[in-house]
Each structure stands twice: as structure tokens, then as C-alpha cells.
Amino acid sequence: MSDHYKSYLLEDTKTCYRYLQAGFTVIVLTSLVGIVTLLAPDAGGLDLRDAYDVLVMPALFIGLGLLLFGVGTHLHIMHLNVVEMRENDDH
């Protein structure tokens, strides 16, 4: 039973960690850009606060989405490993 579902999962189990790292990186970079925007709000006549306000929400949604996808994939792989171990114990 678990072999059928494993074919639909990501082939490399480290891929879920890459999604986690990418999501965390997006969130950290968004925070760092926010700090820079607060420290230097007027750089060369451009108001960086307006640009940051427009970009912060989509960037955080993308980061959180990547984090949730990585966590969900990891939990799904762990669940299939438990199901496979239980199937092997029955035979």
C-alpha cells in the first residue's frame, strides 16, 4: 500500500529540508530588508517604505508557504515510513 503513495512523493527526501531552508531564508531576508528600510528610509530621493510595504506581505506568504509545504512533506514521509514498518511487521 505504501509503495503506491511513495511514487507520488518527492524522490529525494532532502527536498523537504530545502523547502524549509528556502522559506526560512525568504522570511529572514524580508526582515533584514525591513531593518535596512527603517534605518535608511530615504535613499537617493526614493521612499523605500512604500516599496517595502508593497512587497512584505507577498514575501512573507511565500516564505510561510514554503515552510508549511516542507513541514507537510516531512510529516507525510514520516507517516509512510511508519505504515511501511507496520506492514513489514505483519508479514
Image (cartoon, helix red, strand yellow):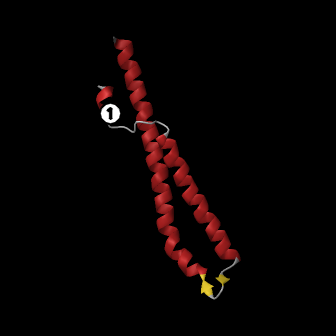
Asked whether, in this view, residue 37 is left or right of residue 26, the answer is: right
| In this rendering, position of residue 26 left or right of residue 4 | right
Residue 55 place in picture, x, y as percent: 51, 72
Amino acid at the residue labelled 1:
Ser
- What residue sits 62% from the left and 68% below the top? 33
| Circle 1: element type | loop
Q: Where is 76 relative to 89, above or below?
A: below
Q: Is residue 59 above or below residue 88?
A: below
- Residue 25 image position (x, y, % from top left): 57, 55
* Mark 1 residue crowding within 10 angstroms, few (<14) / some (14–19) / many (20+): few
* Residue under the point 35% across and 32% down: 6
Q: Which residue is mark 1?
A: 7
Instruction: Locate the C terminus and report the quarter of the image it occupies.
Output: top left
Of 5 and 72, which appears nearest the observer? 5
Q: Residue at x 43, y 48 (%)?
A: 69
Q: Quadrant of residue 83?
A: top left
Name the residue located 49 percent from the left edge and 48 percent from the top edge: 19
Farthest residue to the bottom: give it. Answer: 45
Give x and y (percent) for residue 79. 41, 31
Q: Which x, y percent locates residue 89? A: 39, 13
Q: Is residue 66 above or below residue 61?
A: above
Residue 46: which quarter of the image?
A: bottom right
Q: Which residue extends farthest top? A: 91
